[in-house]
Amino acid sequence: MLLVTVLSIVPGLAVMVTCFPFIVTVLSILRQALGLQQSPPNMVLVSLALFLTWFVMDPVFSEVWLKGVQPLTEGKID
C-alpha cells in the first residue's frame, strides 16, 4: 500500500519541483513555431524534456544529496 502511494505521488512532485513542465512547454511551442504538426511525436518531446530536466537539475540534486540526504543517512541530522 505504501509503495502504491509513493508511486502515485512521486510524478506529481517531480512536475512541481523541477523545470520539466517549462521545458515541455518550450519544446511544444518551438515545434509549432517551426510549422511542424506532429513531426517529433509527443513521446520524443517528453523524453527530451526529461533528459534536459535531469541535465539542468543535476547540480541541485547533487547539492541536496550532499547537504541533506547523506548527513541524514549517516545520523548527523536528526
Image (cartoon, grey):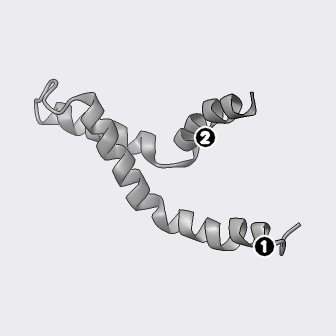
Q: Residue furthest right?
A: 78
Q: Is residue 37 left or right of residue 58?
A: left
Element under label 2? helix
Q: Residue at x 44, y 44 (%)?
A: 20
Circle count = 2
Q: Residue furthest top?
A: 37
Point out residue 10 in the picture as x, y percentages from the top left corner. Answer: 61, 39
What is the C-alpha distance between the residues marked 1 and 2?
25 Å
Q: Is residue 14 above or below residue 31?
A: below
Of callouts 1 and 2, which one flags the residue occurring earlier in the amino acid sequence? 2
Q: Quadrant of residue 3?
A: top right
Q: Is residue 47 left or right of residue 58?
A: left
Point out residue 46 in the picture as x, y percentages from the top left corner. Answer: 33, 37
Q: Quadrant of the C terminus?
A: bottom right
Q: Which amino acid type corresponds to the residue marked 2 in the rendered image? A: Leu
Element under label 1? helix
Categorize mark 2 by other alpha carbons within 10 Å: few (<14), some (14-19), many (20+). few
Categorize mark 1 by other alpha carbons within 10 Å: few (<14), some (14-19), many (20+). few
Q: Which amino acid type corresponds to the residue marked 1 in the rendered image? A: Glu
Q: Is residue 7 left or right of residue 70?
A: left
Which residue is labeled 2 in the image? 13
Point out residue 59 in the picture as x, y percentages from the top left corner. Answer: 49, 68
Q: Quadrant of the N terminus?
A: top right
Q: Pick whichever, 70 or 21, lies toward us.
A: 70
Q: Residue at x 41, y 60 (%)?
A: 56
* Badge number at residue 20: none
Q: Quadrant of residue 24?
A: top left
Q: Residue at x 75, y 73 (%)?
A: 71
Q: Pick whichever, 17 or 34, lies toward us.
A: 17
Q: Residue at x 57, y 41 (%)?
A: 16
Which residue is labeled 1 in the image? 74
